[in-house]
Amino acid sequence: MGRIELGAQSYSMIGRLNASPPPHRPLQLPGTNAIEAADGAKKVMADLKERFPADLDYVVALDTTLAVTEGIKEIVKTLYEP
């Protein structure tokens, strides 16, 4: 049995946040669950934020799972429509 996978040749990128390079650009590995990974990262950051100094905050500049979760909602809606 064969397997076909569509993906980018390279997942490297250059990003900017407010015209400055961001401190970290995590990359999703092929075969991982994007929604689970994003939920885990959000939980870790929420836990860490409790220990941040009062004048320190963080921002999620791009959450690519929003399109995935909206797409899943539309698929479920379509499957359950009479």
Image (tube, rainbow, N blue to C red):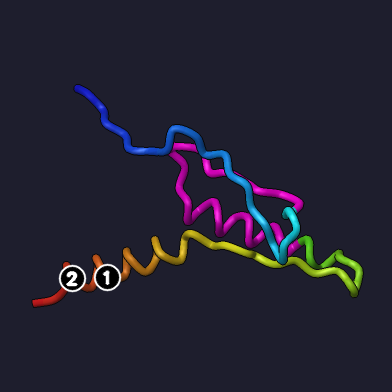
Q: Residue at x 47, y 56 (%)?
A: 35
Residue 27 screen position, x and y as percent: 58, 44
Disc number placed over residue 78 in the picture, else none: 2
56 above or below 39?
A: below
Q: Residue at x 74, y 63 (%)?
A: 47
Cβ atoms under marks 1 and 2 closer than 8 Å: yes
Q: Residue at x 47, y 42 (%)?
A: 32
In the image, residue 34 lies in the stretch drawn in magenta: yes
66 above or below 26?
A: below
Q: Quadrant of residue 44?
A: bottom right
8 above or below 79?
A: above
Pick whichever, 1 or 59, lies toward us.
59
Residue 54 screen position, x and y as percent: 90, 74
Kind of element beneath mark 1: helix
Classify residue 60 as left or right of residue 39: right
Disc number placed over residue 74 in the picture, else none: 1
Classify residue 72 as left or right of residue 18: left
Q: Which residues are magenta?
A: 23-47
- Give the distance between the C-alpha atoms of the residues marked 1 and 2, in whole angstroms: 6 Å
Kind of element beneath mark 2: helix
